[in-house]
Amino acid sequence: MSQDIQTKIEQLTAELNAYNYQYYVLANSAISDYDFDQKLKELEALESAYPQYRDPNSPTLKVGGDITSKFNTVQHKWPMLSLSNTYSEQELIEFDERVQKAIGHSVQYVCELKFDGLSISLTYENGKLTQAVTRGDGIQGDDVTNNVRTIRSIPHQLKSNLQYPEVFEIRGEIFMHKSAFLRLNKEREENGEQTYANPRNFASGTLKLQDSSEVAKRPLDCFLYFLYMENRNRTYQSHWESLSAVHEWGFPVSDNSKLCNSIQEVLDFVHYWDSARHQLTYDIDGIVIKVNDYAYQEELGFTAKSPRWATSYKFKAEQAETILEAVTYQIGRTGAVTPVANLAPVVLAGTTVKRASLHNANEIERLGLHQGDTVYVEKGGEIIPKVVGVNMEKRKPDALPIKYPDHCPECGTALVREEGEAVHYCLNEDGCEPQIVGKLQHFIGRKMMDIQGLGAETIVTFHKLNLLRQISDIYSLGDKRDELVTIERFGQKSIDNMVAGIELSKSKPFEKVLFALGIRHVGETVAKKLALHFKSLEQLKLASIEEIASVQDIGIRIAESVHHYLSLPEHLEELEKLQAAGLQFEVEEKTVLLASDSLAGKTFLISGVFATHSREDLTALIESHGGKMLSSISSKLNYLVAGDKMGPSKLTKAEKLKVPIISDEDLLNMINQ
Ligand code: IVH
């Protein structure tokens, strides 16, 4: 018996740690919040009955953790705690009873929406935003100041006529509005880039980008809900009071919060938002309930990981039950296979759902799907339907498990799954119809070669008629006018338009061509970075995997994919044809006007925060004087320009490699000499 319990605790610990890693580090969740919380509660109960089996690193003791190695790590002045949560109204009533018992009478609560995003802590000194740090593990987080500066609703400088403390910290949630999520995800899909499951993951993935200019293109928003400062209770009596002050200082504070005088008013607020939340332009996953009075908050205090003066009520995602009619498999242009659940139509949060993505083979296995199963469908982030479980009671005894195909359902080629990847691929890129058509359609797309007069439908027609098999065939369509005019609804004028469009595409810059080729994992941004770094196809062809991976934000997976693509003779032959057709395979060198060449031949890396310059300013300064920026500390680095609060690991590495560490002032002196 006790052996069983120990095994169960170990199993739950490992499982929850893996989910935490997926959620916080990979910004991806493979389990619904509800199921996660249920498992966590099961583990908590087992651990409190059998504390001898508790793992010292148990997920029940942790706040979570999203520290990544790419940013400087910063200690929080006040730990960033999480909130206890419940899905039951009875437990809210019990929370109120506990509070009343401790204080001796009823208290006021502030009810707030629980925004489904990422928590952030902002520091202001003399009214100026000086630092923005993610929650991380609650004790220390990532310094994402530059990225947060791109969020329009967050003030960089408070108006000087206001009465705010000299130094304070303000905490809140960063999120993405649903409309921006849908628009950007659609763009990513068109570009063949990985899409995000919900706005929360999109916001999290965005905040973790190294390139702030890319962050600026993805609109994030923020609500602030918490003020910290020295001796706060001397200035403000209550949370409600501080929220109104913070609002006056110019911070975005939600106007959907309410001051409640009883637990009944709290419950009314919860009920109202359970349905009204669908009308919001952003996702919330529950309601936060906070004791209003600071004096009472202090009296109630904290447990190891959350305050006793607050809790959260989480909404169950709206679910529906329906029949899994079939699983079909879509082959994308890169050969990626996506299993799709075809469902008996069912209404969910106001729309009819007929299909839901099953992501990959792991997901089918995790769900243990069988043919004809009755499944539960949920809207992930209230938008994209997903299958979250099976109603086992309704499984037919003779139902067979869904078996992931070994071979491509379109062309019969054996599917492969690379180590560490969740997705199966059909590698028959030149013989698998949906891949061929998908690649051709991708090539002509608006953000790629933008060929006017040639649309996705026409590509399908031309492909069926054998006029197009590979991309280079597009550039000989003009020689096939006699054949083209015989096609229904394809007159002389359409042909002229199309030929003109094709001709015009020859002047598209190298980065667009590189993106348009449809190399696996090469989206718009990656293509841009590769083009900028290597300048020409010739140089890119010569680069090793390591060299490609050394470009900022290019990981080993992308580098391997590019390298592999350029190693295949059929691709080289195709590229030669495109080159012969006149496409751009070199970056047009713009004459860069250098302010001086005082830093020529020297490499730099900037780290930490600077009192008088932003990191972007320093980068621009270095580059305009001929210096080159590197993205990591290596023996190739000549100078590390260090500001305040640089991460300790960077410092150690620089010292170990004997890289000179200089200040921003030293840098200016170098330039002036
Ligand atoms: S207050 C010590 N208020 O929920 C309490 N949190 O599990 C600090 N959240 O980490 C949090 N909306 O990311 C608070 N109105 C709100 C919130 C909120 C969302 C998030 C926050 C926090 C988590 C708690």
Image (tube, rainbow, N blue to C red):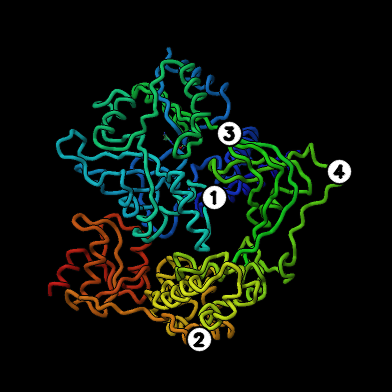
Q: CA distance from mark 3 to mark 1?
A: 18 Å
N-terminal-most mark, 2 or 1: 1
N-terminal-most mark, 3 or 1: 1
According to the picture, the residue beneath numbered tag 4 turns out to be: 397
Q: Is 428 or 163 nearer to us in this picture?
A: 428
Image-quarter location of ligand 1: top left
Residue at the top extreme of this rendering: 105
Amino acid type of the residue that numbered disc 2 sits on in the rendered structure: Glu
- Apparent side of residue 172 relative to residue 370 in the rendered image (left or right): left
Residue 611 vertical placement versus 561 (above, below): above
Classed neighbour count for the residue bearing mark 2: other residues with Cα under 10 Å, few (<14), some (14–19), many (≥20): some
Answer with the quarter of the image where residue 291 lies: top left
N-terminal-most mark, 4 or 1: 1
Classed neighbour count for the residue bearing mark 4: other residues with Cα under 10 Å, few (<14), some (14–19), many (≥20): few
- Check disc 3 and report its element: helix, strand or loop: loop
- Check disc 2 and report its element: helix, strand or loop: helix
According to the picture, the residue beneath numbered tag 2 turns out to be: 576
N-terminal-most mark, 2 or 4: 4
Q: Is mark 1 within 8 Å of ligand 1?
A: no
According to the picture, the residue beneath numbered tag 1 turns out to be: 197
Answer with the quarter of the image where residue 554 lies: bottom left
